[in-house]
Image (cartoon, rainbow, N blue to C red):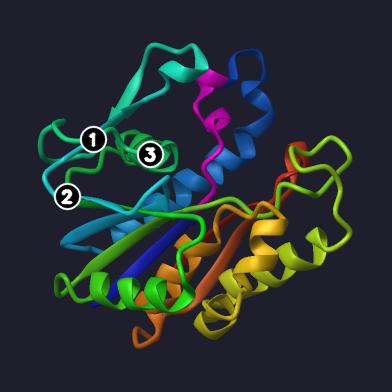
Amino acid sequence: MLVAAAVCPCPPLLVPEVAAGAAAELDSLRAACAEAVEELLAAGPELLVLVGEGPQAEVWTEGGAGSFQQYGVPIGARLPTGGVSGPELSPALTIGAWLLTQAGAQLPTHACAVPADAPVERMLGLGEGLAGLADRVGLLVLGDGSACRSLKAPGYLDDRAEAYDAQVARALGAADTAALAGLDPRLSAELLAAGRAPWQVLAGAGQQAGLGGRLRYDEAPYGVGYFVASWS
């Protein structure tokens, strides 16, 4: 059963070594993520599951690792338990592993990559299945909002982006599983919202959990919507 969840964005710039001279610009975001992960761990889950976008559906149950080499930084991150064999963690999951490392997590941890175009019903079903993996399951869900929030955003400015992100922020803050389940995959793709599929996994996991939500962060630095939320 799902007992708690933390929702965090997954820009590589969260890692200070990657951000370098610009690291201070995201200090408030890092602090919000750290608080959300701390609350997740304080809920006493017996199993953690990371969920984030990846190029294809993959699951890690015996450990895993990723790196920030592609950003010119010779450091990596690994899941708290298990080995490092198997495929490399996707970039989103690598950020999740880094957040858990910063928090000193030592719980059994699985990771699940979901493709950007994954069908809604499949994501809801996956979430329901993840919630049933143990009596006390905690999710760390990684995903960004629209990358079309400004003229300098990766996807340029789209007038629909602000309203879309506001809808997501309300849903995450209220632990509204129905609203997250209702996010349109096509619109999400057009707005470059990388969190759509992971958020719908969360929706599936939380449908019967009766959790409340708290929105910790809702900003769009660099023209990309970033949200941090806690469900407990």
The Cα atoms of the two marked residues, 2 and 1, are separated by: 21 Å
State the residue at coordinates (63%, 73%).
Answer: 184
Residue 107: assigned label: 2
Q: Is residue 57 left or right of residue 196?
A: left
The quarter in which the N terminus is drawn is bottom left
| Residue 118 screen position, x and y as percent | 45, 64
Residue 125 visible, this angle: yes
Based on the picture, tell me whether residue 65 belongs to the magenta stretch.
no
Q: Nearer the viewer, residue 39 or 16?
A: 16
**Which element type, helix, strand or loop, lies under badge 1?**
loop
- Look at label 1 and name its amino acid: Pro
**Which element type, helix, strand or loop, lies under badge 2?**
loop
Give above or below for 185 relative to 93. Answer: below
Marks 3 and 1 close (CB-CB < 8 Å): no
State the residue at coordinates (65%, 62%).
Answer: 188
Picture quadrant of residue 43: bottom left
- Look at label 3 and name its amino acid: Ser
For label 3, the residue is: 90
Residue 87: assigned label: 1
**Which element type, helix, strand or loop, lies under badge 3?**
loop
